[in-house]
Image (cartoon, rainbow, N blue to C red):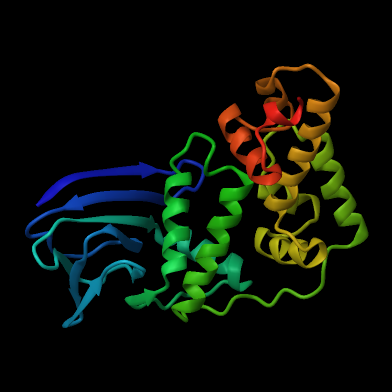
Amino acid sequence: MTEHAKYHHVSEVPGLVLGSARFADIGFDRHYHLDFHIGFVTEGIQRHRSKGESFLLGPGRIALMPPGEIHDGASEGGGAYTLKTFRLSQALIAGMTEEISGQPRELELTSVLLKDPRLVGNLRGLHEAMQQAVGPGSLAVQTQWITLLERLLRQSRAITPESIPGSLSALQWSRVRDYCFSHIDQRITLDDLAGLCGLGRFPFLKQFKRTIGMTPHAWLLRLRLERACGLLSRSGQPIVDVAHAVGFYDQSHFNRAFRQAFGVAPSRYRT
């Protein structure tokens, strides 16, 4: 039976629903979905059957379930387990497939079980981040969403990602840099930056990293922190005001990022 379940509709990614449920005893009966599911367990082990075969979904494993695939799920060994899912509508998965592959195509999906502990950890972090107030629209989450979906679809051999040649031109890089400097106190999205270059999000990510050697999020984060160092050195502004001035939505997020970058808290940097 289900001990508890909750779902979160990601308003900034239409067609995406995040699920989290804890199952005990019998799990769930045979059923199917009309959307595409990415599932992983964070506690316990699930045994599920599809197409006459039985699979174990445990630590470090990811299940990809296409629309219409009949399957069930039960606890392995009688213990409870927690299942987390990304549910993508057919329209969303088709749009993401076209964005990543560079061409519209009918996606031929089959059920796949992937073993990749690092990817599971990244998916778990993304699942949590997308439920935060500023999560789905942030540059970090948008980047991670596209990057992880590309990895999943590539590893499942569902698509071949588009080969993106070249790098950003000097003019494109200048536009991105100037925009980030002048809007540093505001939310900056992947759509914003890609649009400045006249590119889609996926090509922009590839060309930006090839040009700069960092992801757009990593580069922008460092810019925010460097600007914060200057404000901390030159002004007596409260730390929370410094955080807001360089685009952090709260002081605790700013403190964590600053400490990770410089080894000290912002309060220690200015003393």
Side (left or right) of 211 relative to 265? right
Position in image of residue 170 (x %, y %): 92, 59
Quadrant of res 131: top left
| Residue at (74, 31) in percent of width and height | 269
Side (left or right) of 34 relative to 80? right
Name the foreground residue: 92 vs 150.
150
Position in image of residue 186 (x %, y %): 71, 32
Side (left or right) of 119 relative to 33? right
Name the foreground residue: 118 vs 216.
118
Q: Quadrant of the C terminus?
A: top right
Where is 68 relative to 88, above or below? below
Where is 53 relative to 227, above or below? below
| Residue at (86, 56) in percent of width and height | 172
| Residue at (14, 68) in percent of width and height | 76
Picture mark count: 0
Q: Is residue 194 visible?
A: yes
In the rendered image, the residue lying farthest to the right is 170
Position in image of residue 9 (x %, y %): 39, 43
Q: Is residue 103 visible?
A: no
Side (left or right) of 206 relative to 26? right
Quadrant of res 33: bottom left
Position in image of residue 153 (x %, y %): 48, 73
| Residue at (49, 65) in percent of width and height | 94
Name the foreground residue: 34 vs 229.
229
